Amino acid sequence: MNYLNSADLLFLSPWIILLFGALLILLTDCFFESCKNQLYGLTLLTFILAFFFKIYAPHTENILLTNWIKSDFVSHFFTLFFLLIGFLSACLASTFFKKFEAEKLDQGEYYFLLIAAVFGLVLIGSSADFLPLFLGLETLSISLYVLCGYVKRWNISKEAAIKYFLLGSFGTAFFLYGVALIYGATGTLNFDALLPAFQAITGKPEKTLFFAGISLVTLGLLFKAAIVPFHTWAPDVYEGSTTPVTAFMATGTKIGAFAAFIRIFLEGLLHFSPLWNLAMALLFVPAVIYANLVAIRQINLRRFFAYSGISHSAFLLIPLAASTKSSISSILLYLLVYVMATFLAFAVLTILDKEKRGLYLEDLKGLYFKSPLLAGFFTLSVLTLAGLPPTVGFLAKFYIFKAGWESGLYFLVIVGLLTAIFSAFYYLRIMSKMFTKKGDILFTSSYLNSSFFVAVICAVLLIFSSILPNFLFNAIYQK
Amino acid sequence: MSVLNLFILIPFFGSFFALFFKKSAKIFSFFISLIPLYILIFMKQTILSDSVEYSWVKVLSIYFDLKVDDLSYIFLFTTCLIMPIVILAAKEKESFLFSLLLLFQGLLFVFFSTKDLALFTIFFEASLLPVFFIMILWGGDESKKAAIKFIVYMIAGSSFLVAAVLALYFSAHSFNLDVLAKTAEGIPFAPFIFAAFTCAFIVKTPMFPFHGWLSDAYTEAPLTATILLSALLSKLGIYGFFRVGLSLFPTFMEKVNPYLLPLAIFAVLYGAFAAWMSLDYKRLISYSSFSHVNFILAGLFTFNSTGHQGALLQVLNHAVTTTGLFLVASFLEEKIHSRQLFKHRGLLQMMPKLCWCSLIFVLATIALPGTNNFIGEIIILFSVFQDNYLLAACLALNVIFSAIYMLRYMELNFYGREIPKERGFTDIGNEQVFLLLPLMIIIFLIGIYPNILLKNFGVIR
């Protein structure tokens, strides 16, 4: 069968819908001055349509597709997950545009770039080969470079965008170079063919080439996931971007990187060499300690969430180092919980946002007495991120530790547990700020907007999955 | 729906619905908290024979597995007894406080009756949060600092627990305590796992080197949080020793007891000296509570059944006396607006009712014959004497020390010739006396005829 039939097109429908949605938004923005206010709705519609088409999309066996794009459970999960992230980010962005109307920002390009970034993410999540993976990474990165500096008048954003662009290009270049070396060593770029091809290698030069390639690819992905010592871009970029973009980066980019990790190292090259697992294990210890120690000192909340995000992605090195059966599901569960909690926090931050500098720790003072609901949302998010029971964050961490303990990484688990003490300290300190009476936090507008809607969705999901975690665990398990 | 189900769910639902009451939240939650007490007293046989089991997290094989046995019953009874008094004693009017109190009660119910080690861990840690919220919401700046210090200590302790539970799970492949009881001691690294458990419970109780958070938290926290911390939260570690230490690792317990027993006794005396030197009467009571909690641990560490019975009895006694002491101290603080010991003397002339009520709790703390603590402490002293008479002699010194510092509290506040300079201090009202009455009744009931409760608890068979 050398052509695509209708079932295959249905399988591709999420990409097609995203593509056409994005183009439609761009065209509407250019040519129909009067429809500019409908762009937000159009974006949401695109995501929702793609979401529903993906739920009912059939699997495909067509060789034209399966060589490039997988249609397994993980790709299904990631596609839905990324579409959800896109949807939630769009909601946050709409509040942001309303708040900063004075900046006279153009919305069309923003939504276009957002959809493009999600397109890239979905491609990463379903890639079966290094080529689509790289395409996805680049689509995501280029959109994000622009999104970072979206508010052209803010110097802080300009700096962030330039920084991100320069460092990000380095990361991508490393990745690409690594891919080239791997191809040179094995002659294939397909993930499924990679392990047999590696095992067939006999010569020492080829082996060196392969390992050099693997380490460069790993480095590129570690850069995208912002893991110490490749994290330096994250705090500055998070601080300089607008809050909704930061929310998208904190979730989308991170998950994209881990989707790539899952595809390459937990599916394609599972257990190809204990050296790689050792490297991940060795990386975990400094990464998690550094991120947690530095997070204690942060007073800008966007910057704080950058460091807390770095420590969370460092946590995901445990299942990568473990490479066991439950590794993939433990990563998926952790990511789900992390994304819900992060969006909850950023929804509250977007509602409270007032200046370009973002919110500082002191700005949260007295939030509980002004708006118990928002404070409650933020508290829930913070408790989940800190991994304190009875929130589902504890179970997510527990599952990671279980995966680590199973494969004998006792030391990592113990370090992880000890750093959890630090993280409890800084998360709870934020909480106690909110419950201080003295503060004079200002509400510039009512908070019944789309960000509030995001917060409600995430909060309900978090509470529900804390009481009945089986619901979440079912979502991450293959039927 | 079975009785046990109902028993566990009532506080949780109560906690949710209390949020919707504006002014009557206090009355509502008071009555809600009476229902479990009623169930425990009048439906004892039903609840002891009942059990609940659901699969909670299938993938991690965590079961919502509840069963009340004699051991759980004592701790549940203590919780049910203290909670209504805490709710009535709360001065704050916000419905959120009562919601948190009922939530705390529900979390403790699950903790004290679960048979699943993972659930045990989760609720061990979860029960901190309501107290933490009460401390940061209704306390001053000092209370916030104390709350952070307290929770960091607690989470550090819990991380030991998580590591131990994980290690146990991968050797025994089960979280069920009954299954683990058969296999726990034979698994590799069992001594280390036991040490981790011990650390977790010691921090929670707390024992001597890990009590750094205690005096600040007890002293600065609002009254409700102080009582929850001292009367109930300190029992979690003791319950842990009984539930995990004694049933999973009995031989290890026996081996480490010679080292832990002197430490506990040292902590008893340390607390006594610290209380003696305090110039702040709330801090004095905090250290006295610390000292007496370690008395319970001393009984626990003797490793004979007499000592364990004494410790179990002291669990209830300590909760009752500490609650009473903190209540009278807070009444006093409310009237004289000071926590300093040397500021006012001769208050007896102005507040006789408060003085007499205080005296009863003070005498109970000193373990005067005829009060509840006398029975518990004498049993513990007997059992320590069987173990090691030198240590028993040291422990017996505490009786003298507690008399010194508690009578100092009475003397410097209520007695003395001087007439307070500021006039216009009023005595406590009848409603406050009424609040203290159930505690006093229990003190004398156990003191004069202990068998009525000992038999009922199954402590003496």
Image (cartoon, coloured by chain):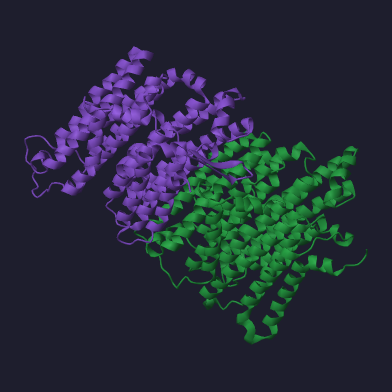
Chain colours: A green, B purple
Give the quarter of the image for residue B174: top right
User: In the rendering, at what x and y percent does residue B416 appear?
Assistant: 9, 34
User: In the rendering, at what x and y percent does residue A284 appear?
Assistant: 64, 42
| Residue found at x 66% / y 58% | A253
Query: Measured along the vertical axis of the image, is residue B73 above or below residue A232?
Result: above
Name the one closer to the observer, A464 or B163: A464
Give the quarter of the image for residue A93: bottom right
Q: How many marks can you see? A: 0
Name the one closer to the observer, B247 or B445: B445
**Residue A146 falls left or right of residue B1:** right
Residue B329 appears in the picture as rendered = no
Query: Measured along the vertical axis of the image, is residue A472 above or below residue B75?
Result: below
| Residue found at x 41% / y 36% | B45
User: Can you name the residue that lies furthest to the right here?
Assistant: A1
Residue A154 appears in the picture as rendered = yes
User: In the rendering, at what x and y percent does residue B230 appear?
Assistant: 34, 38
| Residue found at x 90% / y 49% | A187
Name the one closer to the observer, B117 or A259: B117
User: In the rendering, at what x and y percent does residue B211 appear?
Assistant: 38, 33
Name the one closer to the observer, B142 or A291: B142
Give the quarter of the image for residue A91: bottom right
Give the quarter of the figure containing the N terminus of chain A. Answer: bottom right
**Residue A216 falls left or right of residue B441:** right
**Residue A55 falls left or right of residue B90:** right
